Each structure stands twice: as C-alpha cells, then as structure tokens.
Image (cartoon, rainbow, N blue to C red):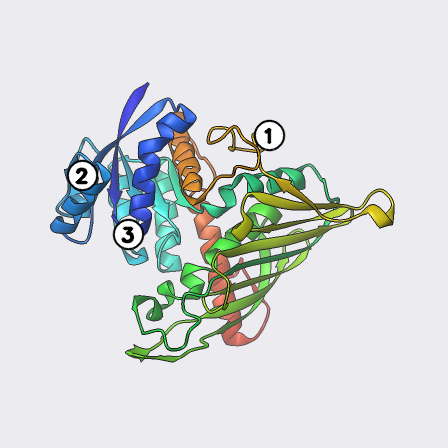
Amino acid sequence: MAEIGIGIVGGGYMGKAHSVAMAAVGAVFDTALRPRLEMIAASSPESAERHRAALGFARAAKDWRELTDDPRVEAVIIASPQDTHRAIAERAIALGKPVFCEKPLADSLDDARAMVAAAEAAGVPNMIGFNYIRTPASQFARKLLAEGAIGRVTWFRGEHTEDFLADPAAPFNWRCEGMANGNMGDLAPHPINAALALMGPIAEVLAEVECVHADRPGGRVTNDDHAQIMCRFASGVKGHIYSSRVATGRKMGYAYEIHGTRGAIRFDQEDQNALWLYRAEGPEAERGFRKILMGPAHPDYQPFCLGPGHGTGYQDQIIIEARDFLRAIEGGGAVWPTFRDGLAVAEVIEAALASAQSGQWTSVIQV
C-alpha cells in the first residue's frame, strides 16, 4: 500500500465530510492508495488551525495557495465556495495534482469550461462531487435501466426538494444573494445530474424559475427559490425536473420516477435504502410496486455492512466518492463523474435560465 497526501480547501460542512471520508476509505474499501490527511485550508489561518485540530490533519495552511503548492500535498479536494473553484483547480492542475471539486463545478459556465479545458489538457485525474447518485439504490437503478429491466423508457420525473427557506419569515442570509447560491446553483444540479446519469444527455429544455419569497427580514432576495424544467432527452424521451428550497415538509427530497414499457422504478432519498420496482408481468390482480431493501447484493453496500436492510447513510456516499477518486489517481484515467460531467450539468442549468428568460424551448447544445 502507498500513502497519498491529501489537501482539503474548506473545513465546513463538505470539508468535514471529505476529511472523514478520506480518513475512513482505506479501511472500508481496502484501497491500494491510503490517504494521509496532510493539510487543510480555510477562510483564515485561525479557522484552518481549528479544523486541523478537529479533523486530524498534520498541518494547517495560511491560505489555499500554500496548500496547493506544498509538495507533500499530492491531491487536492475543493470544498470551498463556488467562486473560488476555478482558481484553486487551475493552480493544482498546473502542478500536476489530481483534483476533486464539489458541485457545482464553478459559479459561471465560462469558468466551468476553463476548468475542463485545463484538466483535460494536463491529463490529470479530476472528479466532481455528486454524491447522491452513488447510493446503493441509485447505482442499482442504473444497473436495472442498463439491463432493460423496465423495457423501453418512456418518461422521467426527477426532483430535489427541501424546505430550509420555506418560512417567509426566515431571515436573509448568504443563500439569498447571487444566482450561484440560489436554487439553480445549489439544488437543481443534483436532479439534473441524476437525469443525465439515469437517462443520458438532455437535448432541450423549457423552464420556469421563480423567487417565491422576495423580501425577507434583513434583505431582498436576488436569486431563485424554485424551478421547474420540462426536458427532452437526446433519446427522444420526455421528462420533468423540479427543484426547490421552499418545499414545505421536504427535508431531502432527492427523488425520481421512471416509466418504461415493461415496468417502472421509484426512489426517494428520504428512504435511501429502498428502491421501488414495478414489473408489468403476471396476473393484473397481483401486480404492484415491490419495495427492495438494499443489502450486500447491491452495489457498494457490503463494504459498509453485511446485514440486508441495515442501511447506509449520507457519509457513506462521500466515502464511495473517495474510493472512486483514489481509483482515478491510481489508474491515471477518468472515473465518472469528471469535470466534463459537471460541465454537462452546468450547460443544462444555463439553457434552463435562458429558457426562463425567453419563455421558449432552448437547445442545450446551443448555450
């Protein structure tokens, strides 16, 4: 086994999740590369030192540049705000270091394209963090679709719904300012990524984007609360995607439903250890959706637990991401999803925003 020095930019919600994942991934998956928590950077040297002590890093960096440039940092994880992603990634890539970047890839389409160009020109392993599609259930759904288990797919519906800003009296905060921090920058990328992973490329969209609670205590909201996107996939299948941060009662509504000529699939992240499968076979009186509990027979479940139905959780998705990133580094090639896959999501977002402005169907390829 060989060690690899990991540097993480950002010590907050996702920075902590990636730190814990890198500390655990070797034991969970018996990886050939074993991460060493080498250095962490945050918004200030003092904050970085607090995160270093709490998360077990060897050193704290005074800023992200010190982290990317340090020779003992051999791979970089970006878990900082979107407007910092491009600069950090380009500096690490120029030094030949593999980069894992949290979604969205950047805060603009131009920056996302620049990151893809830099990574592909340098030939360094690169990944983007879409963790929800990595649950054993969603991996199993992808397998079923690839095998044609529900026949020819005829329709897709996806959503990501939460309610953390459903209360109009909730005070203005950083999420209420700038499109990168709104629903289209924060939540919409997840169901779009799911649609691309499960259904393939999206050809065109017709979208509506809305700010539901424009005035909040402390300020006026400058971004969107929810959006609906009608879409036509390149395969010809029609679909619908909805994302919202004002969906009262929903906490983690990352969900999808897929209809086919011989069956259907349903999934909801709030019950992430189950997949619902309908097969159009047998007597009509005996047909119905079956709830399939995840267990060792499903993708990436057994390394965490040997008991069917015991379940995996949010942090386990991040550990699976860490395993994939290490595999990309070890193999020197691409492991899905790469920066280019993140760019594909950004292009759908851009097309949806353009459609919302024009009120017309908009081709994704034209953005």
Nearest-to-viewer mark from 3 and 2:
3
Q: Position of residue 292 (x, y in %)?
A: 64, 41
Q: Which quarter of the rendered picture does the N terminus lie within?
A: top left
Q: Secondary structure at mark 1?
A: loop
Q: Is residue 82 left or right of residue 359?
A: left
Residue under the point 30% across and 67% down: 174
Circle 3 packing at 10 Å, graded few (<14), some (14-19), many (20+), is many
Q: Secondary structure at mark 3?
A: loop
Q: Position of residue 18 (x, y in %)?
A: 33, 41
Quarter residue 208 falls in: bottom right
Under mark 1, the amino acid is: Ala
Circle 1 packing at 10 Å, graded few (<14), some (14-19), many (20+), is few
Q: Secondary structure at mark 2?
A: helix
Residue underneath mark 1: 297
Q: Is residue 243 left or right of residue 233?
A: left
Q: Earlier in the sequence, mark 3 or mark 2?
A: 2
Q: Are marks 3 and 2 in contact (CB under 8 Å)?
A: no
Under mark 3, the amino acid is: Ser
Q: Earlier in the sequence, mark 1 or mark 2?
A: 2
Q: Is residue 162 left or right of residue 143?
A: left
Under mark 2, the amino acid is: Asp
Give the residue at the far top of this rendering: 1
Give the residue at the far right of this rendering: 283
Q: Position of residue 255 (x, y in %)?
A: 57, 54
Residue under the point 17% across and 40% down: 53
Residue underneath mark 3: 80
